[in-house]
Image (cartoon, grey):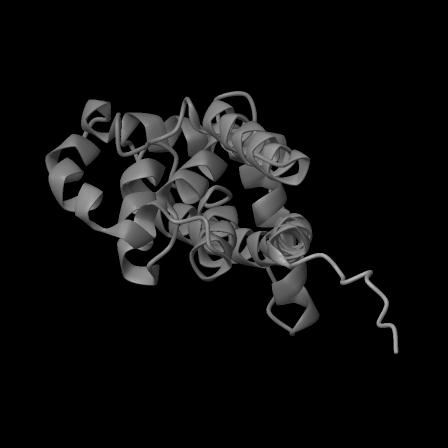
Amino acid sequence: MTAEESEFNKTKRRRIRRVKKWLRPLPRRTNIHRYPILKFFAESARKRVYIWSFRVEHAVPAIQAGSILTLMPLYGIQVPLAFLLALILRANLPIIAGLQIVSNPLTVLPIWYAGYQTGRIFLNLIGVEVAPLHHEEVRLLLDNFIHGAWGNKFDNLATVFGVTNLGAVIMGTFFGLIGSVTYRIVANRTAASYALLRSKINDRKLKSDSPPDNQDSKHD
């Protein structure tokens, strides 16, 4: 094995180990059967290669859809929805599911509030007046939502839900675009580095296989 081949293999193994480390807590072929709801579709999911592919055509839709989904007020059902989106969009499941970690008990309320504010500002810009939410209104809405005591506040809750979803789509599209561009750049650089190493290996093989130059001079 040449030095270039050894370097190529080491680089490839190092990157594979790094990716596996990142994917450890996420749904994978080997552990999807452990996830609630997803376990019922484990066999079907394992047969779909694109769900586990990190090619750009599968990763970019996952980044875009996952960035939007994680910001929507759908906490608790995001992973099953991520699986459904992965099937529909032929997107990478570990990426789209991994992005749902952004929405967690510590961040979900600030994310929802930011989503509502973003949606409200956008609607105000196009001439649709939406009132800002005050802290007391937020507390009442959350209390009514948790206990199911919507009553005459249902219309208000539906409005807040819709505006928050709109804001989530706007913010998620923005962050998804940044993530997609970044992924494309990293993927292109990785492919270029692999291509360079392969080129060095091929050049070395060609040199070793070619016969030595004939140094004998011809005499008259």
8 and 181: which is toward the camera: 8
Residue 111 image point, x, y percent? 57, 37
Image spot of residue 196 (x, y percent): 69, 53
Q: Is residue 195 above or below residue 140?
A: below
The quadrant where residue 174 appears = bottom right
Observer-nearest residue: 149 or 126?
A: 126
Q: Quadrant of the N terminus?
A: top right
Horizontal placement of 191 versus 145: left or right? right
Front residue of 43 and 206: 206
Occupied quadrant, residue 218: bottom right
Residue drawn at (28%, 51%) of the image: 49
Task: Please tell me which residue is depicted at 57% across the width and 48% down the height of the picture.
Answer: 116
Q: Taking the image as drawn, is residue 58 in sight?
A: yes
The residue that appears at 27% across and 34% down in the rendered structure is: 29
Q: Is residue 19 left or right of residue 126?
A: left
Q: Which residue is at 14% across, 45% downward? A: 44
Q: Is residue 185 above or below residue 5?
A: below
| x, y percent for residue 180 | 60, 55
